Image: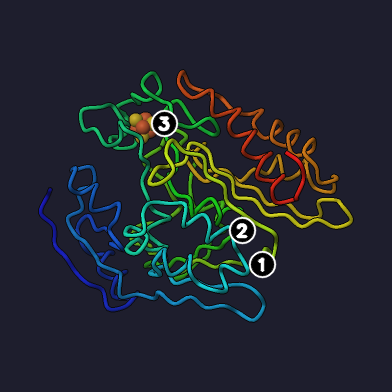
Amino acid sequence: MQRFEYHRAADTAAAIALAARAPEPHYLGGGTNLVDLMRENIERPRTIIDVTALSSAIEARPDGGILIGAGAKNTAVAEHRAIRERFPMLARAILAGASAQIRNMATVGGNLLQRTRCYYFYDDAAHCNKRKPGTGCDAVEGFNRIHAILGASPSCVATHPSDMCVALAALDAIVHVEGPGGRRSLPFGAFHRLPGDRPDLETALGPAELITAVELPAGAAGLRSTYRKVRDRASYAFALVSVAAALRIEDGKLAEVRLALGGVAHKPWRAATAEAALRGKPAGADAFRAAAEAELAAARPLSGNAFKIELAKRTIAATLSELAGARP
Ligand code: SF4
């Protein structure tokens, strides 16, 4: 591990000021991903700025929305009564991830910044455009069973590892950030990037910008919602495919549908094509399967992951059927 300086920031302004002037800075939340990457010499920050003293408050607002401080632990979010009542898919998604010990350490801000679990990214002997831009991508012709089927590029076929972020994508969360240029708020769909020809750039964060909070708007509060994760073993495994879904049914028709997929793309994948196909349709297994077919029409499999296309279709249809109380 490379030597680094450690600083503990007392507040947001101090953290940003330090990050703006320090050599090769990196914010530290729970450290559940970053410290592993530092041990493997994949991440080599020269300055660590501990931001765990920053806000971890979870504020349930009277309008139905919730503001979550970026320092909130994953466990605290999953167990919060208002989140379980208003946004059950988010609690389920968090509890589907990692282990209890990791969830007790991991923060909301850090969860958004998790790096991919592509094997080649962690192997310093492999070619990887994300780790070393311009060196190639060994996953394209390599062992790519866990890799992307949507939105990938020849430069990178990695997937985003977070479960929580899939639910946040479906809920139209807002990411509040602060940096040397002031505060701004980003729609969740604009926070993570597709790989294009710069897979090393994963988010819309600018230099020294810090995530301060994640907001759950009231719009999706109280919807029937859930999160389903398909993986190789029952716990402590990343998603091959996951689905975050929410529905509102009126007179047997789908008045509102929110759908996002995990394990299939470089970022949490909002299934806008399927949502559009379902809006106003009668809630039923045929409509759910047709919407899944429409969403996955754009899928481009690699040599080892074509199975994910059918898996994603079936998981979408089964999850929506469960929510709607329809026969799958
Ligand atoms: Fe690196 Fe992305 Fe290729 Fe994996 S898929 S080796 S992370 S460039």
- Rounded to the nearest angstrom, the CA distance separating label 3 from label 2 is 27 Å
Q: Position of residue 81 (x, y in %)?
A: 54, 74
Of mark 3 and mark 1, the one earlier in the sequence is: 3
Q: Position of residue 170 (x, y in %)?
A: 61, 53
- The answer to whether residue 14 is above or below residue 73 is below
Mark in front: 3 vs 2? 2
Mark in front: 3 vs 1? 1
Name the disc covering residue 156, or none.
3
- Figure quadrant of the C terminus: top right
Q: Where is residue 4 in the image (x, y as percent from the top left)?
A: 13, 57
Name the disc covering residue 321, or none.
none
Q: Do the residues labelled 3 and 2 touch (CB within 8 Å)?
A: no
Amino acid type of disc 2?
Leu
Q: Position of residue 188 (x, y in %)?
A: 55, 56
Q: Mark 2 points at which residue?
A: 171
Query: Which residue: 81% across, 51% down?
Result: 254
Amino acid type of disc 1?
Ala
Q: Closest to the observer: 16 or 255?
A: 255
Q: Is mark 3 within 8 Å of ligand 1?
A: yes
Answer left or right for 8 relative to 225. left
Q: Quadrant of residue 271?
A: top right
Query: Which residue: 40% across, 62% down?
Result: 109
Residue sitting at the far left: 3
Q: Are marks 1 and 2 in contact (CB under 8 Å)?
A: no
Of mark 3 and mark 2, the one earlier in the sequence is: 3
The secondary element bearing badge 1 is classed as loop
Q: Name the residue under label 1.
A: 221
- Rounded to the nearest angstrom, the CA distance separating label 3 from label 1 is 35 Å
